[in-house]
Image (cartoon, rainbow, N blue to C red):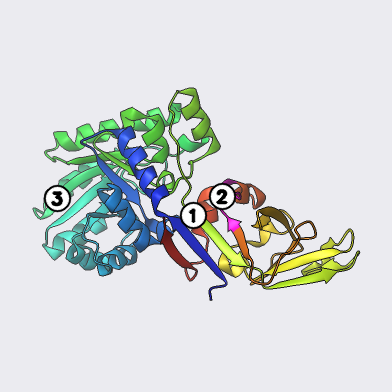
Amino acid sequence: MELSWVEISKSALTHNIKTFRKLIGKGKVLGVAVKANAYGHGMVEVAKVFLKAGADYLCVNAVFEAEELRKAGIKSPILIMGYTPLSDLKKVVQMKADLIVYNEETIKALGKLDKKVNVHLKIETGNHRQGITLDDLPKVSKDLKKYKKIQVAGISTHFANLEDRINHQYALYQLKQFKKAIHLIEADGHAPHFLHCASSAAAILLPEAHFNFVRIGIGAYGLWPSEKTEKAAARAGINITLKPALTWKSVVAQVKEVKKDSLIGYGCTYQMPKDGRIAVIPVGYYDGYVRALSGRASVIIRGKRAPVIGRVCMNLIMVNITHIPDVKLEDEVILLGKGITAEELGEWSKTINYEVTTRIGERILRSIVN
């Protein structure tokens, strides 16, 4: 028996993919980010659902993720978006994966392999993470021409603050810079097939950023990139529904009667206000239920919320069930989903919904349900 497990709704994932497909229209490539264990949802299982629902590309961060997808028998196009060590470039070529490129060393190392490979140039437009500046782009373009087997399959960039603003002036500035880069690279004789910069937020809010390739992340899992994105969509009359796909569950490991004034957990941070009952749940910060949730979060048992009391431990939490009658050993506990949102957990632990789902431990079993 698993002490903690995650259920992923196939119907919710499918709904989200079809929603974005309808939003971006026909004739455009839909890429879905399945990096970081599919934002905590389980990479291989979820990738198969996405592809069946209509996704065209799978986007990962690292070579090991692409390898895992290929080992699982997935033959779809894969784009590796993070840094690939020079020593791993041969693996990329063998897997026939596409690769984000933004430095000369990678280009030279690929050239030495003398094998066909598709690269997508990452352009620095204002996020100041990965990327080739417009000033450096002519030299990179010249370097690429030395290697006939390196195909410039795409050009990409990434928005810096689209999710954090109602006003999208900076995103529009970045879009302008991106268009300059496209012009420069095409004028220099390259013919990239894919042009992409649209994240989930851009897919929803900026049709002009769709080009012919849209790569979504958080939205595919039924979560909004931010509250501001959701509000901006409503103001713009964009009526879409996203369905969260993840439910994280555990069980009651012990029910115990506790006297008034009893101190609960490490540090004795909680004192029972009256005689009552608590339940011990076998999940903790090792599993991704972080310590910052201590005294802030709630779980759901028998359809009712039970507050987390005392400190979250490495492998255990305690909840107050005085108000919930008939709780028994091994009753199901909902930690996230079906009444507890990722946004709530994020607010309680002072982070964002992305981190809430992504930090759920990879060793925890994921299963696809209807």
State how far apart marks 1 and 3 are (Cα). Answer: 38 Å
State how far apart marks 1 and 2 are (Cα). Answer: 9 Å
Q: Residue at x 54, y 60 (%)?
A: 248
Region in magenta: 335-343
292 vs 142, nearest the viewer: 292
**Residue 118, labelled with which disc?**
none
Residues at circles 1 and 2 in contact by the CB criterion of under 8 Å: yes
335 vs 311, nearest the viewer: 335
Measured as percent of width and height from the top left, residue 131 is found at 33, 46
Q: Residue at x 26, y 34 (%)?
A: 211
The residue pinned by badge 2 equals 342
* Structural crowding at the residue carrying mark 3, measured as other residues with C-alpha within 10 Å and reported as few (<14), some (14–19) or many (≥20): some
- In this rendering, the answer to whether 94 lies above or below 190 is below
Q: Residue at x 23, y 68 (%)?
A: 91
Disc count in the image? 3
Q: In what element is the residue under mark 2?
A: helix
Q: Amino acid at mark 1?
A: Leu
Q: Quadrant of residue 63?
A: bottom left
The residue pinned by badge 3 equals 151
State which tag comes first along the sequence, 1 or 2.
Answer: 1
Q: Is residue 299 left or right of residue 198?
A: right
State which tag comes first along the sequence, 1 or 3.
Answer: 3
State which tag comes first along the sequence, 3 or 2.
Answer: 3
**Residue 246, labelled with which disc?**
1
Tell me the mark number nearer the camera, choosing from 3 and 2: 2
State how far apart marks 3 and 2 are (Cα). Answer: 40 Å
Q: Is residue 322 left or right of residue 7?
A: right
- In this rendering, the answer to whether 11 lies above or below 331 is above
Tell me the mark number nearer the camera, choosing from 1 and 2: 1
Q: Is residue 211 left or right of residue 247?
A: left
